[in-house]
Image (cartoon, rainbow, N blue to C red):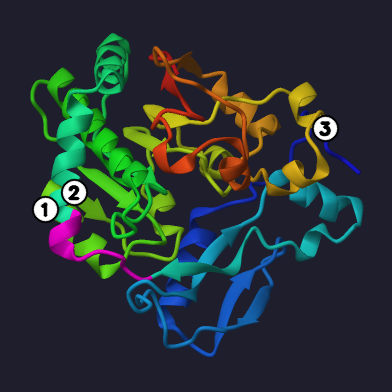
């Protein structure tokens, strides 16, 4: 089976058209959802949750909802080895278990205020601010953050993620002469409570099935994502954009990859490839002081440490695009 890091493909695995198409199809909410394979042929999937859209389950309950699932290059390697690459679909219809809100909008808003205040007086926040001022980040027009979690779930780490997003926007805006930098957030688990409360703190919620925010990334974007459960590195590299900076997991060497168990490999979706490594040569890594950076797949979080009280920086580091790139 081909898994060599040096492998490349003759055309991108992900395209803007594919990402927009699947979002449009899911939005139509028809009986079938149509995507395309590598040859451009239609692939139809039965809409298992027709009529549900992005609706919330009842409070404290969960229910399956549609979302966009993404392939990855090493998965495509397996299809190529079996000589069925032509039928591979890089974006496909998947599902996830969405939780209904566990708190009211007024509770979520009050907790966000408290968490932001606590965060801004923390050593972690000060380290982040100092690091951001030290970075030579190119011009930034917007921030897009993925997977920050539902603030209606009543898990403090999710509010912390959002508090960090606001700090990044404020500091980068100050570095650009007081400019107000918009913050866009995308999270499949957002409920009506989240969509009501987050705009009060300045967030722009991307209400989609999982692909729309990716189409908004450009060279003047800062991308924030911690422990991604999808191949965001590969997607960014394939789309040909080079964000001004990214906060995401550190690169993993081929030796580290080969040392992982089969279970870890199957669940590690944001894996480095030839194309992502080529992209990352244009960036400088900046680790935050005191950050406990680790190499762990999203699905191993609960086995590694207390996720509820985790350090907001665990698992990720900064990459800043070189000004000559």
Q: Name which residue lies at 79% across and 22% down.
A: 255
Is 157 included in the stretch rendered in magenta?
Answer: no
74 versus 119 height, above or below: below
Q: Secondary structure at mark 1?
A: helix
Horizontal side of 254 relative to 50 (left or right) equals: right
Q: Position of residue 49 (x, y in %)?
A: 51, 83
Magenta span includes 107: yes
Residue at left offset 20%, top offset 56%: 108
SS for tag 2? helix
- 153 relative position to 119: left or right: right
Residue 320 drawn at (x, y percent): 41, 20
Residue 201: x %, y % from top left: 14, 47
Look at mark 1 in the image and give the residue it sits on.
Answer: 200
Ranked by sequence position, the earlier of labels 3 and 2 is 3
Find the distance from the CA under tag 3 to the CA under tag 2: 47 Å
Q: Residues within 10 Å of mark 3 (few under 14, many from 20)?
A: few
Query: Is 157 situated above or below 48?
Result: above
Q: Which residue is mark 3?
A: 4
Q: Residue at x 61, y 48 (%)?
A: 299
**Magenta stretch?**
100-108
Q: Which quadrant of the figure has residue 180? A: top left
Front one among 237 and 144: 144
Q: Quadrant of the C terminus?
A: top left
Residue 262 tag number: none
Image quadrant where one finds the N terminus: top right
Question: Which quadrant of the figure has residue 252?
Answer: top right
Q: Which residue is mark 2?
A: 111
């Amino acid at each position: 089976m081909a898994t060599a890091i040096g492998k490349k493909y003759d055309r991108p695995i992900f395209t803007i058209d594919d990402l927009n198409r699947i979002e449009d199809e899911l939005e139509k909410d028809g009986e079938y959802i149509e995507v395309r394979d590598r040859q451009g042929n239609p692939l139809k999937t039965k809409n298992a949750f027709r009529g549900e859209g992005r609706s919330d389950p009842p409070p404290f309950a969960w229910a399956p909802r549609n979302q966009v699932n993404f392939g990855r290059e090493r998965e495509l390697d397996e299809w190529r080895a079996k000589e069925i690459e032509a039928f591979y679909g890089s974006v496909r219809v998947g599902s996830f278990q969405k939780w209904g809100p566990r708190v009211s909008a007024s509770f979520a808003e009050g907790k966000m205020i408290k968490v932001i205040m606590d965060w801004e007086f923390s050593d972690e926040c000060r380290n982040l601010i100092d690091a951001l001022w030290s970075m030579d980040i190119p011009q930034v027009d917007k921030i897009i953050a993925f997977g920050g979690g539902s603030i209606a779930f009543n898990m403090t780490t999710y509010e912390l993620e959002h508090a960090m997003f606001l700090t990044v926007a404020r500091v980068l805006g100050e570095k650009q002469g007081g400019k107000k930098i918009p913050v866009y957030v995308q999270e499949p688990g957002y409920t009506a409570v989240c969509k009501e409360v987050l705009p009060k703190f300045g967030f722009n919620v991307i209400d989609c099935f999982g692909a729309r925010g990716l189409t908004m990334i450009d060279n003047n974007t800062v991308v924030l994502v911690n422990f991604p459960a999808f191949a965001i590195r590969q997607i960014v590299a394939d789309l040909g954009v080079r964000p001004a900076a990214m906060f995401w997991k550190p690169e993993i060497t081929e030796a580290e990859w080969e040392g992982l168990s089969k279970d870890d490999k199957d669940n590690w979706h944001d894996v480095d490839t030839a194309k992502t490594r080529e992209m990352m040569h244009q960036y400088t890594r900046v680790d935050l002081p005191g950050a406990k950076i680790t190499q762990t797949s999203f699905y191993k979080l609960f086995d590694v440490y207390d996720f509820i009280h985790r350090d907001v920086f665990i698992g990720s580091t900064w990459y800043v695009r070189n000004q000559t790139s």
